Amino acid sequence: MERIQFYPPENLKRVMLQDAEVNSISISQLTVNILMEHYGLAVPTANKKALSEIIDDVIDEVKAFIKERPTGTTFDLLTASETFKNIHMVADGKPSTNRATVGKVFASKLGKDDDFKNIDIVRTESGAVKKSANRATLYKIL
């Protein structure tokens, strides 16, 4: 993303700060959301989901993916979940932030959640986390 400077008049700045605070987003994200809507590039409200719903959907899709695959299969979340792959930029923030959050939630379930006891992170010989072609963490069904 490119950085663009914006100098709103004081009355507009006040209103924007209030709106951003009410929606728990940054001024920058508020500005992007407003401009996306203005230019017809915004995701329709019906397609927006809270991050907690996205996490639940991704976890359910990964569970289904794992059940359909044999032991030894390696995967990343982009491969295992269509929802993860389609996280949109205006769904509670930037995709990298949302994807990272979903990835952390998934990783925290490994070895603890019954559905993910047999999943582990793939590591190189040196112990570093191995990445997929998508530059995402690789997991393996044990």
Image (cartoon, rainbow, N blue to C red):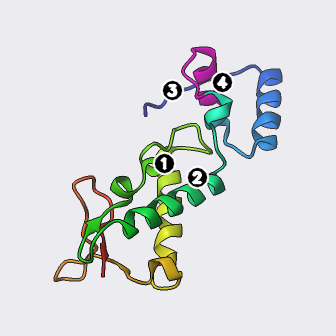
| Marking on residue 34 | 4
- x then y, percent, for residue 82: 43, 48
What whole-number distance in Å separates the C-alpha atoms at marks 3 and 1?
30 Å
Q: Residues within 10 Å of mark 1 (few under 14, many from 20)?
A: some
Q: Considering only order in the chain, which callout, 2 or 1, is on the residue closer to the N terminus?
A: 2
Q: Residues within 10 Å of mark 2 (few under 14, many from 20)?
A: some
> Is 141 a magenta residue?
no
User: Dot 3 corresponds to which residue?
Assistant: 4
Considering depth in this image, is 13 or 49 the residue closer to the camera?
A: 49
Indicate the quadrant where residue 64 lies.
Answer: bottom left
Q: Considering only order in the chain, which callout, 2 or 3, is on the residue closer to the N terminus?
A: 3
Indicate the quadrant where residue 10 lies.
Answer: top right
What whole-number distance in Å separates the C-alpha atoms at marks 4 and 2?
23 Å
Q: Residues within 10 Å of mark 3 (few under 14, many from 20)?
A: few
Q: Residue at x 57, y 14 (%)?
A: 39
**Label 2 residue SS:** helix
User: Dot 1 corresponds to which residue?
Assistant: 83
